[in-house]
Amino acid sequence: STRLLIEMSLDRGQPGELTHKALVSNWGIFYLPNQFTFSRAMISHNCYPSSVRNRLKLLAVATLIAVAASQFSAQAYEKVNLCTAKEKTAVQSHITKQINAISKSDWRRAYNLSAESFRKVVSLESFTSTVKSQYKFLIFSDGFGFGTCEKAKASLNQIVTIDYRGTKRTLSFDLTTEKGRLGVVSANEIVAPHGANA
């Protein structure tokens, strides 16, 4: 399932944006728009009556809620539990193999560690291009560590923290077992809200 991170800002009197962010950048199968933006300058401009400005604000918020709600699958409502020790070991070993393959530019091996359902809709070329353009921090990482591992009915989710040039990038990996074989379905970067502590 794809997780959402929503940031809504309506501070008055300051330039800025109302932004919807969704664990941006995955490997193609569950791609979510990076952001939907409503200019606060437009909403608060004096040429609009206050009633119109209020309606625009409500419309912006309602639109964000509708977009977010539309992205949730039935899995979002499944009971989530922590992975067992065996599941955690298998998931972390699998992700380690994929990240190591990416760091060595072994694209075929990294791609083959994806789930079969992923490979049916995303080509090797598309996978390689996406990783090179959006996941450079995996190619040139200084190391990585694992966070929480959770499981739902049909998937496993593992949080991975990547060390990259003095910063930390966080990825949410979703994996599933198909025909007895574990595979990565998506890897979404978790983007913290503006102003949040790193």
Image (spheres, rainbow, N blue to C red):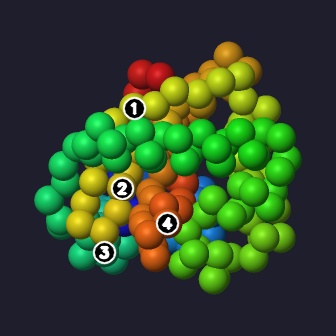
Looking at the image, residue 25 sits to the left or right of residue 156; the answer is right
Question: Given the current orientation, which residue lies at the most extreme left position?
Answer: 79
Residue identified by numbered label 3: 73
Label 1 CA crowd tier, 10 Å (few <14, some 14–19, many 20+): few
Residue 80 to residue 179: above or below:
above
Image mark count: 4
Image location (x, y in percent) of residue 123: 75, 76
Secondary structure state at the residue bearing disc 4: strand
Q: Amino acid at mark 2?
A: Leu
The residue at 18%/66% (across/down) is 77
Q: Amino acid at mark 1?
A: Gly
Residue identified by numbered label 4: 181
| Alpha carbon distance from label 1 to label 2 | 13 Å
Q: Amino acid at mark 4?
A: Arg
Q: Earlier in the sequence, mark 4 or mark 3?
A: 3
Label 2 CA crowd tier, 10 Å (few <14, some 14–19, many 20+): many
Looking at the image, residue 81 sits to the left or right of residue 174; the answer is left
Residue identified by numbered label 2: 156
Q: Earlier in the sequence, mark 2 or mark 4?
A: 2
Q: Earlier in the sequence, mark 1 or mark 2?
A: 1
Residue identified by numbered label 1: 147
The residue at 53%/62% (across/down) is 183
Q: Amino acid at mark 3?
A: Ser
Secondary structure state at the residue bearing disc 1: strand
Image location (x, y in percent) of residue 179: 46, 76
In the depicted view, which residue is nearer to us: 27 or 67? 27
Residue 182 to residue 62: above or below:
above
The residue at 65%/24% (across/down) is 143
Label 4 CA crowd tier, 10 Å (few <14, some 14–19, many 20+): few
Secondary structure state at the residue bearing disc 3: loop
Image location (x, y in percent) of residue 117: 54, 78
Looking at the image, residue 163 sits to the left or right of residue 75; the answer is right
